[in-house]
Image (tube, rainbow, N blue to C red):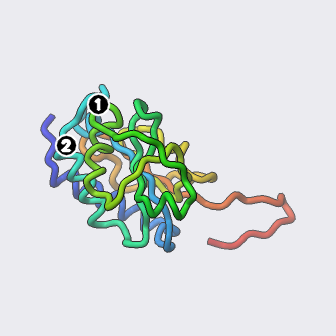
């Protein structure tokens, strides 16, 4: 299956816009977790090295369109225990612990390896708690989102051949039946 990188770019923009329209992601300082299986975008089930140009198209769409005050964390594949790439500034702000690894296509995934080019000062961390996420190819980002995760229904359900799921988080509701909550 031949996948057009311009179509993939536009599909990602549509997903990101849908996520941002869902609300709370426009708050300054929010963290967006993004993960992507390029082989699944290409329409293949096996997780093998994918086309770096498709990864660049998605990275370009992310960096061209995310709000300036929204940080990005790119999740690596299971070969690196789903570690994440963030800006060093994010590492410091969120008091994260850096791990020593360089994502490459064969260990980390094509998307993660290519995304390194888009960060100003990339570092890899083992875990994070993001405010929202985009999961391209069902790569399991839930472990890196704050509780409580709220899946979103988006108009764009696929990027290339990969199923896309997006989510945002909300604070836990505590206190039981007598408690009162802020309306959102």
Q: Residue shown at 45%/38% (left/top)?
A: 82
**Relative to 103, 2 lies left or right:** left
Q: Which residue is at the far right?
A: 178
**Relative to 139, 151 lies left or right:** right
In this rendering, which labeled residue sits more in front, label 1 or label 2? 1
How far from the left and from the top, in percent, is residue 28?
49, 73
Q: Which residue is at the far top?
A: 46
Q: Residue shown at 43%/41% (left/top)?
A: 100
179 relative to 144, above or below: below
The N terminus appears in which quarter of the rendering?
top left
Task: Count the labels in the image.
Answer: 2
**Relative to 13, 4 lies left or right:** left
Residue 52 is marked as: 2
Crowding at dot 1, Cα within 10 Å, few <14 / some 14-19 / many 20+, comes out as: some
Q: Earlier in the sequence, mark 1 or mark 2?
A: 2
Q: Is residue 60 visible?
A: yes
Q: Which residue is mark 1?
A: 106
* Near-viewer residue (100 or 179): 100
Q: Secondary structure at mark 2?
A: helix
How far from the left and from the top, in percent, is residue 99?
47, 43
Cβ atoms at labels 1 and 2 below 8 Å apart: no
- CA distance for labels 1 and 2: 12 Å
59 relative to 158, above or below: below
Q: Residue shown at 24%/44% (left/top)?
A: 160
How far from the left and from the top, in percent, is residue 106?
29, 31
Q: Residue shown at 40%/59% (left/top)?
A: 87
**Relative to 90, 162 lies left or right:** left
176 relative to 68, above or below: above
* Near-viewer residue (133 or 117): 117
Q: Secondary structure at mark 1?
A: loop
The C terminus appears in which quarter of the rendering?
bottom right
């Amino acid at each position: 299956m031949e996948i057009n990188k311009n179509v993939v770019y536009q599909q990602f923009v549509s997903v990101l816009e849908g996520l941002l329209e869902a609300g709370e992601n426009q708050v300054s300082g929010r963290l967006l977790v993004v993960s992507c299986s390029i082989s699944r975008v290409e329409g293949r089930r096996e997780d093998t090295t994918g086309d770096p140009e498709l990864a660049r198209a998605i990275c370009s769409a992310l960096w061209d369109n995310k709000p300036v005050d929204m940080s990005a964390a790119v999740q690596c594949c299971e070969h690196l225990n789903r570690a994440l790439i963030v800006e060093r500034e994010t590492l410091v702000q969120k008091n994260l612990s850096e791990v020593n690894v360089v994502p490459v296509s064969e260990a980390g995934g094509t998307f993660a390896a290519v995304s390194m080019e888009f960060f100003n000062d990339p570092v890899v961390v083992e875990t994070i708690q993001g405010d929202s996420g985009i999961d391209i190819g069902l790569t399991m980002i839930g472990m890196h989102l704050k509780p409580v995760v709220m899946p979103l229904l988006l108009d764009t359900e696929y990027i290339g051949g990969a199923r896309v799921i997006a989510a945002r988080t909300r604070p836990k509701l505590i206190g039981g039946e007598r408690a009162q909550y802020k309306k959102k």
